[in-house]
Amino acid sequence: MSTTPLKFEHTSLAGAQFNDVNLGTARFDDVNLGRATFTNVALTGATFDDVNLGTARFDDVNLEHATFTNVALAGAMFSDVSLRNVSIADCNLEGMKINGILVSEMLVAYARSNETNY
């Protein structure tokens, strides 16, 4: 196997399927992965900048220490996912639910409980 990282530029990977591959520390910049499928893939430390993942599918994928900046996840569904130590900042959470509860409502309730504790 080559030790030189592969580089794809101005390439269509529409409908790409990644199965049982190591994409650790891969960089995805300004790409549309909307219909991509990732199955049993290591994306540890991967970077996603300006990426559309709207209808992408991730099954048995390791995203530990991955970074997402300006990424479209609209309509995404997460099930049986470890979100341990995940940090979410400066994000549009409109309509986002966790276990059927709107996150916006959780944040309002949290703010109210902090007001009454002071």
Image: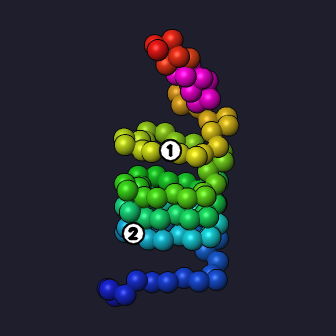
Q: Nearer the viewer, residue 20 or 25?
A: 25
**Residue 109 in the image: above or below residue 103:** above
Q: Position of residue 66 (x, y in %)?
A: 42, 58
**The magenta stretch spans which residues?**
102-111
Checking the image for residue 104, the label placed there is none
Contact, mark 1 vs mark 2 (Cβ under 8 Å): no
Q: Residue at x 62, y 29 (%)?
A: 104
Quarter of image, res 81? top left
Q: Residue at x 41, y 52 (%)?
A: 60
Residue 37 makes an appearance in the image: no
> Label 2's element?
loop
Neighbours of disc 2 within 10 Å: few (<14), some (14-19), many (20+): some
**Residue 99 in the image: above or below residue 10:** above
Q: Whole-Å distance between the Cαs marked 1 and 2?
A: 20 Å
Q: Earlier in the sequence, mark 1 or mark 2?
A: 2
Q: Position of residue 7 (x, y in %)?
A: 49, 83
Q: Nearer the viewer, residue 103 or 22?
A: 103
For mark 2, what is the residue?
A: 25
Task: Please state which amino acid type lies under the numbered disc 1.
Answer: Ile
> Label 1's element?
loop
Checking the image for residue 88, the label placed there is 1
Q: Residue lying furthest top in this view?
A: 116
